[in-house]
Amino acid sequence: MNVVSHDCGRPRVGISRCLLGDEVRYDGGHKRDALLISTLGALVEWVPVCPEVEVGMGTPREAIDLIESDDGVPAGQARVCLLGVESRTDWTGRMTTWSAERVLMCPDLDGYVLKSDSPSCGLQDVRVHGSAGVARVGRGLFAEALVRMLPDLPMEEERRLHDQSLRDDFLSRVFAYRCRRLAIPNPNPESRIPNPG
């Protein structure tokens, strides 16, 4: 891994709890990502979050889906509701409110690793169920809040970080973000946080 050492200290990186091996998934399982933990774990301080548990769904729990809805909330390229697969319990309002509040508690984060395909954490191409079938056009509701409220924060899904060049780029962006957040000169001038606009 070609990562420039920084004087910025160890960055704090949010992560979907299931990726660390915590048994918080709907079925009581986890999605521990050994490669991610072994490659980035010594370089960052993980800040684990499970939106579904923290919003009150419990473990184990009913699976949830993003359902296309004109009255729904933005989620990637779709407007959706977040519903229980069997009960059709509507979690949309609770999840969007909790997500906005939780993101406000993240001002000291320097990056975020999200669980792909998750209706709460997926960053891109999350399944949205609609009248025409299933389309991969959604974003998890917590990820949507992160993107909307912290647009400059480096974010990636765990599956993309299995590619070493993407992993190295992510880590460089994380350190650059941390240096800028702490107003410390970045020793790697090629690492930049893209400015919106």
Image (tube, grey):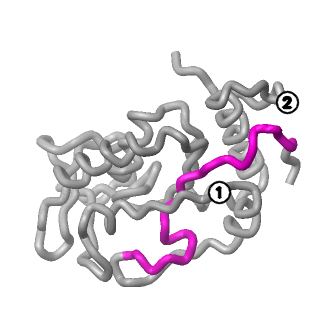
Residue 29 among magenta residues = no
Residue span colored magenta: 4-25
- Residue 59 spot, x, y in % from top left: 32, 79
Classify 10 Å Cα crowding around label 1: few (below 14), some (14-19), many (20 and above).
Answer: some
Any mark on residue 152, and which?
none
Q: Residue at x 76, y 62 (%)?
A: 42
Q: Say if residue 137 shows up in the picture.
A: no
- What is the three-letter code of the residue carrying label 2? Pro
Residue 9 among magenta residues = yes
Q: Nearer the viewer, residue 138 or 51?
A: 51
Horizontal placement of 124 versus 3: left or right?
left
Q: Secondary structure at mark 1?
A: strand
Asked which quadrant contains residue 50, the reply is bottom left
Horizontal placement of 156 versus 22: left or right?
right
Any mark on residue 45, and which?
1
Q: Say if residue 136 shows up in the picture.
A: yes
Q: Earlier in the sequence, mark 2 or mark 1?
A: 1
- What is the three-letter code of the residue carrying label 1? Glu
- Residue 170 spot, x, y in % from top left: 69, 45
| Quadrant (top left, top right, bottom left, bottom right) of the N terminus | bottom right
Labels in figure, total: 2
- Residue 54 spot, x, y in % from top left: 32, 63
Q: Which residue is mark 2?
A: 187
Q: Residue at x 34, y 77 (%)?
A: 26
Classify 10 Å Cα crowding around label 2: few (below 14), some (14-19), many (20 and above).
Answer: some
Q: Nearer the viewer, residue 143 or 150?
A: 150
Label 2 to label 1, Cα distance in Å?
20 Å
Q: Is residue 183 above or below residue 51?
A: above
Asked which quadrant contains residue 160, the reply is bottom right
